[in-house]
Structures are given as C-alpha cells and as structure tokens.
Image (cartoon, coloured by chain):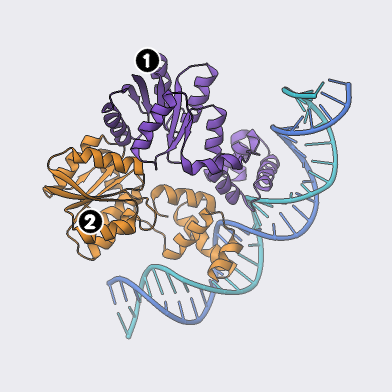
Chain colours: A orange, B purple, C blue, D cyan
DNA sequence: CATGACTTATGACACCTGTCATATTTTTTT
DNA sequence: AAAAAAATATGACAGGTGTCATAAGTCATG
C-alpha cells in the first residue's frame, strides 16, 4: 500500500485527484494540502512513501519543496505535477532529483501508472518533455540579474528598483543590460519575456 | 437527465471532471473536448443542456465561445470554470450572459451543485467573486491601445510595433502614452502589468 | 448636421534606457 | 595563492520613451 501526500493549490483538481486515487486499492491518501509549507509539515508528520506536488503554489513552490526534502535527505519519493513545460522548471526538478515530472495535460491514468512505477524505483517524465531534457540550456543569469528582471516584470522602473534595493541607478542599468545581452534580448521587457518562458525567473 | 459538454484543455482535470460527473445519476457527459473550436462543434452537434468551459483554451477562449453561443441564440446553458479571478474576465462573462462562473479553487462538489442549480435556471458564481462584481471597473482601453499593449507584452519595441502595423513610431507612442495614462501607470511595462491583472489584454 | 470618440500623424522637449569602458571589492573556484 | 566570477560604482553617448500641442479624417449617436 503506497501512502501518498498531495500538494496542489487548486482545490477542484486536488479533490479530483484524491477521489480518483482513493479508488485504487493499492494507493492511499494520507494528507492533502494547498501550499508548500503545509506540504512540508504534512510530509514530516506522515512520512509518506510518495508525494504529488504542484509547482506554482503559494509560500513554497514545488521545486523549492523538492530541494528542501532532498537536502534534508528525506526518503519520500517526489512526483511533480504541473501545467508548465518551461525548460527551467524541468532542469530545476532534475537538479532536485525528483522521481517524476508530469504535465497536467496527461490523462489521469498516466498519473496513476506513474505513481506505481515510481514506487518500484523507476523515474517517470511526460513524453512531451524528453526532448527538452536534451536541450539542457543553462540559466546564465546571476542572482542579482534575476532579481532585477523580477522587479522589472512587476513593472518597476530603474528608479524604483534602485530605491527598493539601495543601489544606484547605474548599477541597476548595468545588471539589466547584462541580463539583456545574456538572453539575446533587445529591451528589458523582452528579457523578462524570454526569462519567464524558460522558467528562469 | 442533464446532458453536458466539457471544454477544458488540461486533460487531467477534464478526465477527472468527466469521471466524477459520470458518477452522478442525473448528469450525463455527451462530449469532452480540449479547445474552443471543438467545443463549438460539439455543442452544435449534441445540443447539450449545459456546457462547462475553461477560459484559457487554444483557438477560441471560453469567453469568446460564450459570446458566440449567445449571439447565435443557442439555448445551451454555460458555466465558466477557470483559475483566474481577473475582474475583466468576469465582466466579459457577465456581458456574455453566462449562467455560472466558478473558480477551480472551489471544491468539486460545488461544481456538481452548481450544475444542478443552473439546470433549474439559477445563476451561480463563486463567493470570492461577488465583491468584484460590484467594483464594475470598465475597461477604458480602445482597440488600438489594447493591441499596442499586447505587442508590448511580447517585448516588441516601438520600432518593431510600427513596422508590424504599418504605423509611424509617433502614433505607437501616442497610443501607449494614452494607455499608460488611462491605467495610471508610469511606463509601458507597468501598463502591461496592470492591464493583464485586470483581464483587459 | 453637429458633437464626440477613435484613428492617425507630426515635431519638440525632457527624461529614461542600454551600452561601454573602467575600476574596486568580495566571493568562489581552481 | 592565483584566477575567475560577481557585485557595485561612475561617467558619457546614442537612441528610445513618455508627454504635449495640434490637426485632420472617419464613424456613430443623437
């Protein structure tokens, strides 16, 4: 009997997963939660065999959660279930050594099968993603550059960013300039767009 | 017996809906599709009592689909089921006279109940959204302004937009300037951000 | 048919942005 | 310890952006 924790913030989907998984005789839901921090607590409390986690959740993202579990050497197997095929997400997931990475675009049976395969020690990823695995494009951005792009994404101007971070305007422009060049963009907006698409910010 | 068409692009969720709805004796799924155009065809073919549609789908969005059905006077009741609480979406939905507007954040039972209530002629919207209904903020953007913001969102520069639309740079800047003022933003990026959040682009 | 909203355009001004050269300090890697 | 990468800063230049005044044409509304 595989003991499972589900972390997914959309209640409709979470409820559906729970109901459908409960119908399988060899699978058991021990907890279902709506955000990353709750998930961490639930996993520490229940010690499940496996957890299904969404990436975009409030608090802690699924990827951060995975990294944390691996850093603390928790033996729980991890399956990421997400809408997004952003290359950066998949790479982060690989780095965190998750056991599965499925798109919500798959049929639900695929999820059930994936759980069983992961329980046997296999790794499972959605078919559409295998090609992305080989691209293996590295995120070239430094921490500061990422920070600038994130603020630029919110629509902040150079001036506002400089006040927020207590840096000079020139420095902000330098970071953004370097990010723009690394991403082969032509403006900060384009850079934001590209970085979002790759899952780097 | 209520005959239902489901239009939802995430297969996992669509499959889950179908499975769970089929368990109800008074509800029947006559078709399930993954995009707006297919949905339109399915509705014309099967003449369901009710359709559940997602907003963000390839091809035709759920809101466009709703508007089309109402314009052609199709009697099928419409329930929008979406992740997004952007005010603009809700307003468009109201304009299209949909019968329900639910967030995917609701429990699945709420969906089932909503279907039954809509069948009886009631209107149903998620509780979290009632307050937004009263805000009733009108989209102040003209068609052209919206177009500019959409292109700016993709990261295009003034120059690129002007070439794409065969307009002078000055004109582009005027439109963007006027959009920026209407949205009380301070830059095109901020304007894009605000307009996206309100569901206006 | 007059009013008003929308589209399109131009020129000018101030300010913002992206780039580059250059430099210092700190941190990381080898 | 030396080398490389990152964080931070400055000044200057070219070009992009936002604003404003102004104007002319189109189209719908009353």
* Residue located beneath label 2 in the image: A97
Q: Nearer the viewer, residue B161 or A122?
A: A122
Seen at 46% across and 65% down, the residue is A144
Q: Nearer the viewer, mark 1 or mark 2?
A: 1
Mark 2 — on which chain does it sit? A
Q: Nearer the viewer, residue A34 or A97?
A: A34
Mark 1 — on which chain does it sit? B
Secondary structure category for the residue under label 2: loop
* Residue located beneath label 1 in the image: B46
Q: Is residue B93 above or below residue A77?
A: above
Residue A199: give its label: none
Q: Is residue B61 visible?
A: no
Q: Is residue A11 visible?
A: yes
Q: Is residue B201 above or below residue A63?
A: above
Residue B8 percent coordinates (x, y): 37, 31
Secondary structure category for the residue under label 1: helix
């Amino acid at each position: 009997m595989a003991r499972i924790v589900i972390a997914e913030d959309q209640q409709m989907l979470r409820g559906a997963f729970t109901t459908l998984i409960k119908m399988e005789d060899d699978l058991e839901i021990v907890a279902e939660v709506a955000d990353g921090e709750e998930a961490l607590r639930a996993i520490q409390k229940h010690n499940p065999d496996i957890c299904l986690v969404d990436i975009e959740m409030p608090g802690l993202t699924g990827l951060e959660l995975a990294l944390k579990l691996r850093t603390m050497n928790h033996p729980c197997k991890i399956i990421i279930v997400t809408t997004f095929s952003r290359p950066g997400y998949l790479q982060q997931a690989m780095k965190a050594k998750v056991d599965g990475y499925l798109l919500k675009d798959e049929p639900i049976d695929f999820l059930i099968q994936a759980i069983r395969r992961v329980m046997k020690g296999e790794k499972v990823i959605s078919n559409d993603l295998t090609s992305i695995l080989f691209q293996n494009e590295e995120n070239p951005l430094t921490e500061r550059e990422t920070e600038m792009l994130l603020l630029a994404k919110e629509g902040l101007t150079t001036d506002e960013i400089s006040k927020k971070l207590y840096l000079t305007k020139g420095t902000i422009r330098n970071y953004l300039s370097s990010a723009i060049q690394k991403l082969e963009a032509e403006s900060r907006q384009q850079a934001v767009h590209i970085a979002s698409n790759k899952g780097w910010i």
